Image (cartoon, helix red, strand yellow):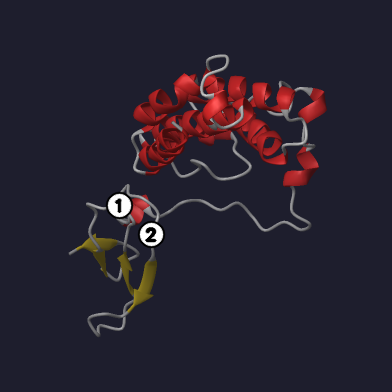
Amino acid sequence: PRQQVMLTSNLADELLKSGHIDEAIRTVEPFLFPGAGAAVGAPPLHETRDFLAVCYMRRGTLENCINRHNASSCLLPIRREGVYQVERGPRAAIRELLAVLAEAPDNLGARWLLNIIHMTIGRYPQEVPERWLIPPNAFEAEYDVGRFRNVAPPAGLINPALAGGGLMEDFDGDDLLDIMTSSMGLTDQMRFYHNNGDGTFIER
């Protein structure tokens, strides 16, 4: 039974990493029931809730930053057009994180995520419980570095995939820097983007 619990936890983690969010949630939900697996090494309840919060946060990212992508998506501090339109993921994550902090009040990771998730739905700082609030000045730079805007999609550099690597080099000798990217997705391929010389790229 202990091995089964461990493997179930590992399976849920791999499902989440590979983008199977709903399956990951269903896999660990049995750990939430009172006494479920406590005698056979199930993770503490707050750890399961912490994992679920990340699952719900990923769902929010998928439904907003990916499916409704714009130049301000998922860039801190989140504001204006970067605020999520679909709130079911963030709302569920907030519920789980409040439960985590009730049981483990020194969990700084949960506190950080709670503030960020409120930011994603435009409810920061006003709806963050005072006890867990990270002051807005914590997100301010010591000097103005400007506002980063994601100009990759208009330039032709968009291909939703898992985290990977990237490099820029003049691969074809035309004195223009091209881009090659990779992904950790098992079924993903490397991609080569040729520099058109006008600020845009085309995949080849």
| Rendered image quadrant of residue 136 | top right
Which residue occupies the foreground of this view, 60 or 14? 14
Q: Are the residues at dot 2 and dot 1 in contact (C-beta closer than 8 Å)?
A: yes
Mark 2 crowdedness (10 Å alpha carbons): few <14, some 14-19, many ≥20: few
Compared with 83, 142 (above or below) is below
Residue 3: percent from left, percent from top: 43, 38
Q: Which residue: 48% across, 41% down?
A: 73
Amino acid type of the residue tagged 1 in the rendering: Gly
- Residue 179's quadrant in the figure? bottom left
Query: Where is mark 2, residue-wise?
Result: 164
Chain-order first, disc 2 or disc 1: 2
Residue 147 visible in this rendered orientation of the protein: yes
Nearer to the camera, 63 or 144: 63
> Between marks 2 and 1, how big is the CA–CA gap?
8 Å
Q: Is residue 181 left or right of residue 123?
A: left
Q: What residue is shown at x 36% (from left), y 38% (from top)?
A: 15
| Quadrant location, the C terminus | bottom left
Position in image of residue 194 (x %, y %) = 24, 69
Q: Secondary structure at mark 1?
A: loop
Which residue position is annotated with label 1? 185
Expressed as whole percent of the image width and height from the top left, the position of residue 34 reads: 57, 14
Compared across the picture, whether 7 is left or right of 138 comes to: left
